[in-house]
Amino acid sequence: MTGVQEKLKVIAPATGEQIGEIEETPIRQVEQFYHRGRMAFNDWSQLPLKKRLDYLRTLKEIMVNQMEAIAKIIADDTGKVLTEAIIADIMPTLDGIDHMCKHAEKVLKGKKVATPVLLIGKKSSIEYMPRGVVLVISPWNYPFQLAMIPVISALVAGNTVILKPSEVTPLVGKCIEELFSQAGFPEGVIQVAHGGKEVGAAFTTGKPDYIFFTGSVRTGKIIQQVAAKDLIPTTLELGGKDPLIVFADAHLERAAKGAVWAAFTNSGQVCMSAERLYVEKTIYPQFLALLKKEISTLRHGSDRDADVGSMTFPAQIDIVKEQLTDALNKGAVLETGLSPEEWEHGMFLPLTVVKNVNHQMKIVQEESFGPILPVIPFESEEEVIALANDTKYGLNASVWTKDRQKARRVASKLVSGAVVINDAIISVANHGLPFGGAKQSGIGRYHGDGGLKIFCHEKSIIEDSGRKKTEIHWYPYRDKYPLFLTLFQSYFKTNKNWIKFSKMYVKLLKKG
Ligand code: NAD
């Protein structure tokens, strides 16, 4: 061991310049992190919820005051434009805090539950108990929001947290660490471990009490396997290949604007971005023209008014290139954009609409995570539902039509964690709605009431006054069988025979 700490270089993707260095957490410290987290759990879990929420309110105030500085860190570290840093990373986090401050007490409060007649005289209730030390592993595309919301939810529920943010956007990880420190969270309550997948893997094997992972399907499967060895519960928020369906009776200008935004916001590096566009055949040429017109108004850049930022992760460009090349080799045609060999070097990719594509192509089957949008015409509602569902993913979808009944009918048939009608992506922005995927887009949900409850053991309590000497279902069983038989038959018959039931009950009581 040299004692020299590894450093993560911070490169601004939009400019290629090094803008910082972050010390990597040495793997030998994993045990210390868990030890500190477990020590801190004793007090944090016992702190009244109101007090935990006070820490959150302080955090929120700091975030509001430092909003511009945080937005700049996010934009520099990811290459996304400032407007998107504010609307899609910072705002949803603040709104999530507000939501929790408003609802957490009700959600986490113990509840009384009715007790069935067969358990006469007892009381039933549910209690929510924090799990312990929660490990949150987060990705680089929305590095602020996708780390903050699970961390905050776990903290509110009374857990302590270790966050392993993405090594691709380490400045944001550092910024999160500093925000919690400024808000005065007690030592060990929230710790941030910096580093890449080796650090993530080391923390995964460190036996957390819960793992909340957001990232690729590939890593999600690895994490699930490791967690399964110790039966550690997990939530997995994974990839997507979301369909956007436009019917001929939609407001076409709105749908085209919406589709362009849904496909190209954050340079298409969105788990819920529109990655397959299905357009009703009768309006297909007209809609392609509208897309082209809308795209021509957009401007790449990193200034305040820019629309589309750069890619964040260089390796992602190779994936996009490979998918597009494969499609073009198989007969796809560019409607906008350039073929990959014409792309300039650098992290800004052309906004690319591709037609003549089919479901055998990678560009339609695999997650792209870049600014490319394959477009496919369809003829009927049944056909487009089948096409939309022909994927291993199921994160989000959107349906565009003025016929609300048709929209709801189609939405109900899509195998997807969420569906947005006449808009896209925004289901994630309502913290009252559960968020998560179907099929390989993930396991579990967060946001909403469930977003706090997943970080708790849901404990059932049933109590008896303890005054009676015995119970009818206890030993001895001698002579009880026929009485139970009559008791249950009289109780479970469609027309309950209460007289018979009471008689048998009294007889059983007498038997002791
Ligand atoms: P990734 O899986 O490569 O990395 C995610 C995180 O896991 C990073 O912090 C990384 O360091 C860590 N990691 C990698 N290997 C690990 C291992 N073996 N053990 C433990 N940790 C490990 O994903 P990414 O490239 O950062 O993010 C892009 C992916 O995330 C896309 O597939 C996208 O669709 C998905 N995503 C999903 C959601 C959602 O909510 N469903 C949101 C955003 C992104």
Image (cartoon, rainbow, N blue to C red):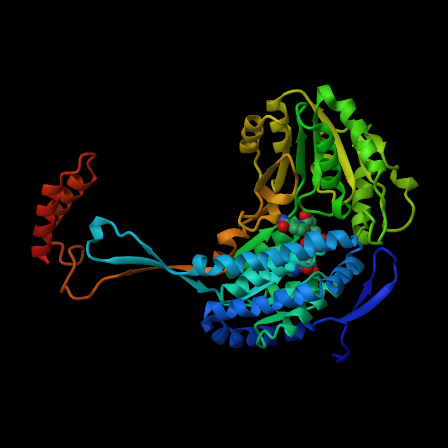
Query: Where on the picture, by quarter, is residue 69?
Result: bottom right
Q: Which residue is drawn at 10% across and 52% down?
A: 508
Position of residue 206 measured from the top left corner of the image (x, y, whole percent)? 58, 68
Left or right relative to 215: residue 333: right
Give the quarter of the figure containing the N terminus: bottom right
Left or right relative to 237: residue 103: left
Q: In this view, does 473 lie above or below 490?
A: below
Position of residue 216 measured from the top left corner of the image (x, y, whole percent)? 67, 50
Q: What is the total number of numbered labels drawn onto the structure image?
A: 0
Left or right relative to 461: residue 78: right
Position of residue 402 measured from the top left corner of the image (x, y, whole percent)? 62, 27
Q: Is residue 469 above or below residue 33?
A: above
Q: Please state which of residues 461 and 111 is positioned toward the viewer in this rendering.
A: 111
Q: Is residue 372 visible?
A: yes
Q: Which residue is drawn at 82% across and 27% down?
A: 331
Q: Which residue is drawn at 50% across and 71% down?
A: 51
Query: Where on the picture, by quarter, is residue 248?
Result: top right
Q: Is residue 273 above or below residue 18?
A: above
Give the quarter of the figure containing the C terminus: bottom left
Q: Can residue 226 be seen in this view?
A: no
Position of residue 431 measured from the top left corner of the image (x, y, whole percent)? 56, 51
Q: Please state which of residues 206 and 130 is positioned toward the viewer in this rendering.
A: 130
Q: In this view, does 184 lie above or below 223?
A: below
Ligand 1 located in image quadrant: bottom right
Specify the farthest residue to the bottom.
3
